[in-house]
Structures are given as C-alpha cells and as structure tokens.
Image: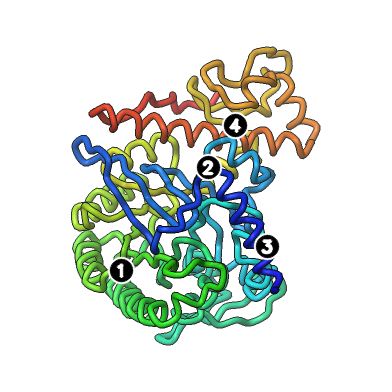
Amino acid sequence: MGVYTIVYTQVKAILRDAHCYNPLAVSLQFQIESSSGCARAGRLITPHGVVQTPVFMPVGTLATVKGVPQDVLEELGVNILLSNTYHLYLRPGVDQVRRLGGLHGFMAWPRAILTDSGGFQVFSLNELRKVSEEGVTFRSHLDGSSHFFTPESAMDAQIGLGADIIMAFDECTEYPADAKRMRDSMELTLRWAARSKKHFELHKHEVPWNLPGQHQALFGIVQGGMDLALRKESAERTIEMGFPGYAIGGLSVGEPRHLTQEVVEATLEYLPKDQPRYLMGVGTPEEIVHYANLGVDMMDCVLPTRAARHGLLFTSEGRISIKQVRYASDGGPLDPNCSCPVCQRYSRAYLRHLYASNEVLAQVLNTIHNLSFYLDTMQRVRHAILLGGTGALLPRTSVH
C-alpha cells in the first residue's frame, strides 16, 4: 500500500466523522438556494464537502494559512481554502505532495481546496520571466533556477496536487497596458484556456485518491485588462469552451479601485447565472460585501492574513492598528461585537503587548481574528440573501 493511500484513508475517515464527505459528488455541483436582486446564496458541492456561498476563501499559499492550524480553521468554519501551484511546485514539489496523498493528505485538511494555476505569481516575477506562445520561462524566486510552465504542465501540477477546483493557465495583463497589449494578452489566455481544458479532459481521472467517478473541476478565467469590450469578448469565448465555473482574473494589479469595480460589474453581466462565479484576489471587507451583492459566489484575498501580520485588525468599530501605544492599557476586547476566540479571551492591551514584543503569538491571534471577521461578514451577507435582502452591516473604514 502506497503512502498516499494510507494518508488518504486517514483523511477519508476524518471526512466521514465530520459528516462532510460526499461520495456521490462527481466533479462539482452548484445549487442556488435563494436570490435577491443580483445576489444569490448557494451550495457548492465538492468531493470534499459542501461549501455555502457566497464564500470567502482564506489563502493558504504554501499549504498553510500562515500561523493558523487546520483544526482552528475548521472551528472558524472554513470549508474551502486556496493554495498556490507556483509555490508548491517549487517547494516541496508536486511529486512529493502527490506521494503523500495530495494536498488533502499532505496538509491533513479534509475539506475543499482550490488551487490557482500559478499564472499570477509568474506574472509578478517581472524581470524573471519570459512569455511565449508555448508557455512561460521563469526563474525561481528561491534559488534562481530556471523553470518552464505551459498550460499542459500547469494542469499536470494541479492534477498532482489534487485540489477539488483548479484553474486554467492564463496570462495576467499588467496595468496600465495599451489596447494592443490587452488584446494580445486576452487572445493568448484564450488559447491557453483551450489547451488547459484539452489536457485536463485527457488526464482528469489520474488523481489516485479520488473515488470512482470523482474528478477535479477546472474553471476558466476571464481576462481582457481594463477594456470592458475585451472583457465581454473574453467571457463569451471562454464560456463557449464549456467550463463548470468561471473566474474574473487580472484585477488588483495596481489599478484604482473604482476601475476594479467597473470591470467586475461589467464582466458579471456576461457570466452564466447558474454556474459559480469566482473573483480572484479581491478585497477589503467592504468590497467582498459589495461584490457578493453583485452576484459573485467565491472570493479570496491575502489582505486579512497579511494585514494581521502587520498589526492591522478589522473590527465592527473600524480598523485598528494594534501597534499604537494608545492600546497599551486598554483592557477591553479587540471587538466587543465579535465572538471569535481572540475577542472572547484577550484584551487589546495584551494583543498590543504581543505585537510590541515581536511575539509569534501576536501574528497567530491577529490572523485568527481577521479571518473570523471576514468569514462572519460573508455569513451575514449569505443570511441576508436567504432572508430576501442584500448587504450586511459594514464596519467603519477608518483606521484608529
């Protein structure tokens, strides 16, 4: 019996005990339970459990949400998280993860996982990459070694990692970009999407720890820069390829926020109403509420975890920079309206002390709170939609 079989058997037992294992789930199912205006509340059924939407997905780049153990993520109500193909490909390597039962077995996570293709990370390497029709040559940010990603190899990597939802390999268009550049980049993404889908269809049953009939779901990605006409064309041509879900990519690349909102609103108009819609890499608590109300089903962002590591905390009373000396003697909870374990147990003074002392626990507790805040915000949105309304009680945006 191989190592991955042993590990997956253990994970499967955890899933069964958690009552979230669904052996009848084939690939992906999406059910809309209620809608109000453009907003909708649904259920995303994966081989590793049901995900209630709209959903915020914490980012676990290296198969870990920094500083937060998996059992705590479960207690917070995380049913799906995101990991990054580029980083896992470099370390510890796809073959290593595959031998240990894929991401679910490797990181002992019994719930759903989404992996991105690595396209955005390769894009962010700037001078360390070279794009051609065939793929992207890039140098590792770890040791400078040279690597080559193609749509086919990106699919092989994600099949090896074994996430429930994987993404087509795309090129992320920089901002600003002229009309020709946006057109060329969009066309390349469309050709790569077709190659990604063709390769995936040929190899989608090669994940050894899936049950018979189960396989991953491959989402297409809409690009087109900030050109609304190109976004429309990209959406229509990507939909023609027949993916089970669609993502809006190429945002949060330096453009002003009002332009991000304009592109999202325009693109959503052309995406199927009965399939999951995923907005990649966005945003603040206010933004995720806004986009959920527009009909986005899935979102991810590094902001809650990254901000936590720098002492910026989201609360119902506004954003708090816990590093400020004003909190040194504040015995009150971080957020009196928050039921997360941090707010229920620790004072602002203690959190400030941990941060000022450069204690690792500061990052852990801050991250737990910020994640809880994001998850609770999305839960309030979902609850409002189920009751026939939209929106959620938004926190003040000022930092104090």
**In the displayed structure, does residue 209 sit left or right of residue 116?**
right
Q: Quadrant of the C terminus?
A: top right
Q: Quadrant of the N terminus?
A: bottom right
- Check the image and name the residue furthest to the bottom: 134
Residue depicted at x 44% and y 39%? 284
Alpha carbon of mark 2 to alpha carbon of mark 1: how far?
Answer: 40 Å
| Element type where label 1 sits in the image | loop
Determine which residue is flagged by label 2. Answer: 78
**In the displayed structure, does residue 25 sit left or right of residue 6?**
left
Determine which residue is flagged by label 3. Answer: 7
Label 3 neighbourhood size at 10 Å, few (<14), some (14-19), many (20+)? some
| Element type where label 2 sits in the image | loop
Question: What amino acid does circle 4 point to?
Answer: His
Residue depicted at x 52% and y 70%? 158
Determine which residue is flagged by label 4. Answer: 369
| 193 or 352, nearer to the observer | 193
Label 2 neighbourhood size at 10 Å, few (<14), some (14-19), many (20+)? many
Question: What amino acid does circle 3 point to?
Answer: Val
**In the displayed structure, does residue 364 sit left or right of residue 286?**
right
Label 1 neighbourhood size at 10 Å, few (<14), some (14-19), many (20+)? few
Q: Nearer the viewer, mark 2 or mark 1?
A: 2
Residue depicted at x 60% and y 41%? 73
Alpha carbon of mark 3 to alpha carbon of mark 4: how far?
Answer: 31 Å
Report whether residue 348 is seen: no
